[in-house]
Amino acid sequence: MRTDAMLDVTADLTIGNQLVMQSDASVTQSSGSDVSIGKYLNMLSGTHYSVSDHASLSIGTQLYMGHNTKFTVKGDGTSIGVQDLTIYGEVEFVLGPSGTGTFDVYSC
């Protein structure tokens, strides 16, 4: 994604290899959508990814969050699955009324 690009995901989306987010790009994922990224999600400086409203994100290999990045997990039933992660940025959890929402790191 180019600098300042915005992507609003409300339906299922499959990205074959990788998603690279450049400066000030943002992704908002919601409405029960399932996003699957084959290998890598690379968040470079100034980027933001938000997952909410029963949405799920699956990353095949690695989530890399550079400096000055933010990843937000909001609400009931929201889940993130990733094999490996490197975090220099901020991860924020805002759980729903039932207190659910997960961030799973697992190895395959």
Image (cartoon, rainbow, N blue to C red):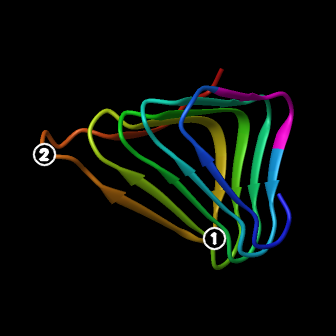
**Which range is magenta?**
13-18
Residue drawn where x is 71% and y is 56% of the image:
64
Is 65 included in the stretch rendered in magenta?
Answer: no
> Left or right of 52: which side holds 64?
right
> Left or right of 9: which side holds 44?
right
**Label of residue 88 in the image:** 1
Residue drawn where x is 76% and y is 64% of the image:
5
Distance, label 2 to label 1, CA atoms, is: 29 Å
Work out which quarter of the rendered image holds the N terminus and state it. bottom right
Residue 9 spot, x, y in % from top left: 59, 42
Mark 1 Cα shell of 10 Å, populated few (<14), some (14-19), many (≥20): some
**Label of residue 45 in the image:** none
Q: Quadrant of residue 70?
A: bottom right
In the image, is residue 91 above or below residue 99? below
Marks 2,1: beta carbons within 8 A: no
Magenta span: chief secondary structure: strand
Number of numbered discs overlaid on the protein picture: 2
Residue 16 spot, x, y in % from top left: 84, 28
Residue 17 spot, x, y in % from top left: 86, 33
Q: Which amino acid does label 2 sit on?
A: Pro
Mark 2 Cα shell of 10 Å, populated few (<14), some (14-19), many (≥20): few
In the image, is residue 28 above or below residue 33? below
Per the image, the residue denoted by label 2 is: 97
Residue drawn where x is 46% and y is 42% of the image:
30
Of the numbered discs 2 and 1, the one sitting upstream in the chain is 1
Name the front one of labels 2 and 1.
2
Which secondary structure lies at badge 2? loop
Residue drawn where x is 77% and y is 68% of the image:
44
